[in-house]
């Protein structure tokens, strides 16, 4: 039943490749939205994008295999953003993480969501990809 095994959206993929994977998830969900469990699969099979993009934007926080407290990091980005775009990234990442990603990953048997919620989640991921590209471009311009 899995639409895209978690390994199919992997670290290091280009923004276009991530978008293609998210488009596949949307297409599959559109075709099977009424199927029990399909929205949950759409969320759980794409949710690692949040951490992956965070790792790419702030690699220094992940040095030597350390894993920072990502929710605290995102909240801090939202509350005291270095830039407006980073604040948006932090706000969206926090919402997606606490509302969907964490329950989908850690409470697999209890996690339920509607197709509309799954579409919202995937659109949020697409927004993070867009922000990631814009933040990178902004940083490249500043250097």
Image: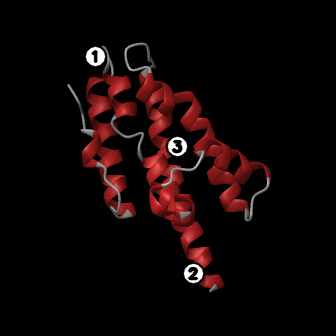
C-alpha distance separating marks 1 and 3: 22 Å
The relative height of residue 92 versus residue 83 in the rendered view (above or below) is: above
The quadrant in which residue 92 appears is top right
Q: What mark, if any, has residue 35 been given in the picture?
A: 1
Element on which disc 1 rests: loop
Lower sequence index among marks 1 and 2: 1
| Farthest-out residue, right | 80
Which of the two discs, 2 and 3, sits closer to the camera? Answer: 2
- Residue drawn 41% across the image and 29% down it: 105
- Quadrant for the C terminus, please: bottom right
Q: Is residue 42 left or right of residue 92?
A: left
**Residue under numbered circle 3:** 124
Residue 140, numbered label: 2
Residue sitting farthest toward the left: 1
Q: How many labels does the image show?
A: 3
User: In the image, residue 138 lies at what x, y percent?
Assistant: 62, 75
Disc nearer the start of the sequence (2/3): 3
Left or right: 82 with respect to 60? right
């Amino acid at each position: 039943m899995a639409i895209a095994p978690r390994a199919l959206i992997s670290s290091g993929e280009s923004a276009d490749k991530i978008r293609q994977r998210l488009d596949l998830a949307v297409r599959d969900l559109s075709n099977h939205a009424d199927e029990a469990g399909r929205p949950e699969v759409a969320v759980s099979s794409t949710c690692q994008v949040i951490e992956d993009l965070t790792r790419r934007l702030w690699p220094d926080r992940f040095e030597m295999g350390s894993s920072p407290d990502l929710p605290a990091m995102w909240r801090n980005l939202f509350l005291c953003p270095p830039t407006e775009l980073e604040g948006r990234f932090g706000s969206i990442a926090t919402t997606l993480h606490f509302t969907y990603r964490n329950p989908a990953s850690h409470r697999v048997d209890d996690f339920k969501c509607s197709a509309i919620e799954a579409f919202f989640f995937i659109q949020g991921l697409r927004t993070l990809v867009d922000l990631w590209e814009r933040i990178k471009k902004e940083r490249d311009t500043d250097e």
